[in-house]
Amino acid sequence: MSKKTVVEFVDFLKPRLNRRSVAFLLCILLSALFWLLTSLSKEYVDEVIIPVEYENLPENLLIVNEPIAAVTAEVQGFGFDLLWHSLRLDKVQITVPANPSSLPSVKRGGEEIHFLLTQERTGKMSIGDDQLVVLKIYPDTLFIKFKPLFIKTVPVKLDADLSFAKQFGLISSPVVDPDTITVSGLQSEVEQIEFVATEHQSWTDLRESLTVEVPLNQIRNSRLVRYSHDQVQVAVNVTEFTEGSVSIPVNINAHNPESVKVYPSEVEVKYQVPLADYDKITPEMFRASVQVEENRNDQLLVVQLDETPVQVRQTRVNPPHVEYILQR
């Protein structure tokens, strides 16, 4: 609101306000305040929602039924206290000992179910410094079904699409840390899990390494299955590659290799190597061979690469086949 508008509004009110009208307005305000104070000083019965907290659950047990998160309580108290509670200025909750040894149980369908009678809390629990008294609680019984906790270690699999800028690529496979996690929960659910995948990632046109936190895919019934980790760290090692080539002799694998001649006797191996490792690659790191079998009629032999340096990738042999003759 602009200053001009405020001035115009005040100028509008001035001729219309006098002492009588101001006194009348004050009387109305005082009457409303007196009525509010009188109303809040009376006792009322109302319903409030109270959260339920389950505590001291043994580490080797799991609650398999859906536990009730909150109950409805019928309470009695003064209006001030009800208002105070409705504004949630007092934190109130019902604590349930989630331990089979602390709770009674019944047999249903051949299974043991533990329970707590909430009505036992009426008259004993109060809200807001004993100012609101609990008369009734609904539901009157809380049921808890326990099962042994089953634990299993499974691998983590990265779900990601990778693409690289020209002449760039991976030095090694992406590293996932941790590469295994602990899955715990209901045995029938956990036993079906063979691995846990990350949420799908798409990293495109990469030209440098990256390290990111990636969330794990949560299963639908996550209440009965828990992961030791919600996310993992993924390291993608990217570097620039260049092309290199070497000429190496062709080794002959035969019963009598001296009687076999191949043409050409050397082949060229082309490869891609990280730019930083280019000068470390020598022809001695490669080994190529052909397999000669007796009584074969093929005129060409396939050249196989038996050894290559760990730094290189995308190797190609030229020519991929060689001719041979047998000397009797």
Image (cartoon, grey):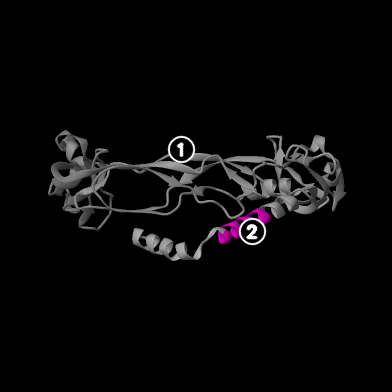
Q: Position of residue 146 (x, y in %)?
A: 75, 43
In the image: residue 250, left or right of residue 41: left
Residue 67 visible within the image: no
Along the viewing direction, whichever of 199 and 37 lies nearer the viewer = 37
Q: The N terminus appears in which quarter of the rendering? A: bottom left
| Residue 195 visible somewhere in the drawing | yes
In the image, what residue occupies the spot 35% across and 58% down?
3
Q: Which residues are magenta?
A: 20-32
Residue linked to disc 1: 178
Q: Contact, CB < 8 Å: mark 2 with mark 1? A: no
Residue 265 sits in quarter = top left
Q: Residues within 10 Å of mark 2 (few under 14, many from 20)?
A: few
Residue on which the image places disc 2: 28
* Secondary element at tag 1: loop
User: Of callouts 2 and 1, which one flags the residue occurring earlier in the amino acid sequence?
Assistant: 2
- Out of 133 and 257, give the one closest to the viewer: 133
